[in-house]
Amino acid sequence: MRNKRTLIILGVLVITAAAFIYRSLQNMNGPTDREGPGAFFMSQGNLAASFNQELTGQLKVLPEQLKVQVKINDSLVFEATNPPAIIPLKISIKGLPLGSYRLRVISKGSTGVNSEDERVLYVVSDVAPKSWSLEVVRQYPHNDSSFTQGLCFYKGKMFEGTGDPQTVGATMVAEVELATGKILKRRTKPQPIFGEGITVMNGEIYQISWKNDSCFVYDAGTLSPLRYYTYSGEGWGLTHDENTLIMSDGTEKIYFRDPKTFKVLKVLSVYTNQGPINYLNELEYIDGLIYANVWMSNIIAVIDPLTGRVLSTIDATEVVKKGKGTGEVLNGIAYNPTTQKTYLTGKYWPSLFEVKITQAKAR
């Protein structure tokens, strides 16, 4: 009985081995169905190209491919008929904004079947950010019960907007005395409103909210409510230029909005030469540039509002060490155009700082 069982097992093993050898010989000597695309990028992973420059690389084309196309999103940017085995690519991306795009190589084989190699194309900045220095000039008291989400000046007066992480109705906009940190007047919002960035434009305070899809507008003199707007998505930081509101949502995106309707007019992606800068938080517009706190870091990014390129970064670690205390992250940038002075603070910080920012000298 035992010998019979052994013979059966040996027979099964012999049959299995013979089948394996047969398949191997077939794969060596005969045609097989190829897996994967008929044409593909020879480099591994996703691709990157610098702003207003060229996308370069090589395509590998397998035999019996009749046509190869390259598309960025849905736009055809390259096509070859009866392509060679190797195709060098040099595709202009001039005019393509910073950001991420769907990049596809589409090949048509002799059987009429199309195949694709899909990647992500990142259009990154063509300049490396410079490092600007920061110096603390003066330290002021700050209300350490304020979860600072927005800070700005208007006609020499300082305004602050707060959030409500403890869900106790702590969201407010307030006029604050710089020298003492005293709240001179305030307008609060009940929970669940969670206040975020603020800015004052044409005598009106705009205050966005985190996840409440609402922007509240107040009179800057009296803090009386005027109106509100609705929008989709999260609100983080807010500032303005001469004509538009500028808003962040915690991603790498910056939104330019009409102050009369709150409709989006333009969207920028913020990139260095290495990739996107996510978690853009509180914003301030200073001398034609956007300054942005980067959440959970001591870095302030200085952004070109025309392209989204990060032109420089500022390391505010010195301010954090001197002023954080038991508070939370750096958040709050304010520029007083009357005095041309810049101020920084953070969430639940006991201090607010006047700082001097020095740009890197050209070499």
Image (cartoon, rainbow, N blue to C red):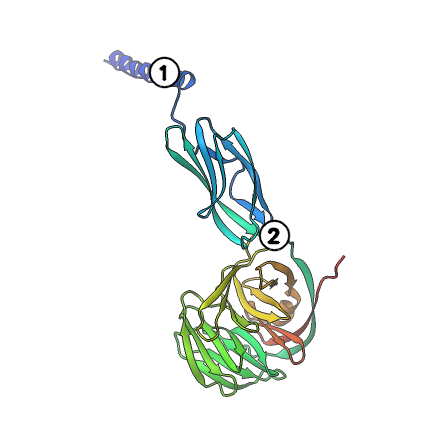
The C terminus: image quadrant: bottom right
Q: Is residue 291 visible?
A: yes
Identify which residue is drawn at 46% across, 76% down. 260
Residue 306's disc number: none
The N terminus: image quadrant: top left
Report how far apart the C-alphas of labels 2 and 1 lie in the structure: 53 Å
Q: Where is residue 254 in the image (x, y as percent from the top left)?
A: 52, 63
Q: Where is residue 133 in the image (x, y as percent from the top left)?
A: 70, 64
Identify which residue is drawn at 40% across, 66% down. 232
Q: Disc 2 or 1, which lies upstream in sequence?
A: 1
The residue lying toward the viewer, choosing from 157 and 304, is 304
The residue lying toward the viewer, choosing from 234 and 68, is 68
Query: For residue 25, which quarter of the picture?
Result: top left
In the image, is residue 79 above or below residue 152? Answer: above
Q: Is residue 190 left or right of residue 55?
A: left
In the image, is residue 271 above or below residue 209? Answer: above
The residue lying toward the viewer, choosing from 30 and 149, is 30
* Secondary structure category for the residue under label 2: loop
Residue 273's disc number: 2
Residue for badge 1: 22
Q: Where is residue 264 in the image (x, y as percent from the top left)?
A: 46, 66
* Secondary structure category for the residue under label 1: helix
Q: Find the residue positioned furthest to the front.
A: 81
Q: Position of residue 357 (x, y in %)?
A: 69, 68
Mark 1 neighbour density, 10 Å: few (under 14) some (14–19) many (20 or more): few
In the image, is residue 124 above or below residue 299? Answer: above
Query: For residue 97, which quarter of the picture?
Result: bottom right
The residue lying toward the viewer, choosing from 137 and 167, is 137
Mark 2 neighbour density, 10 Å: few (under 14) some (14–19) many (20 or more): some
Q: Is residue 128 left or right of residue 189?
A: right
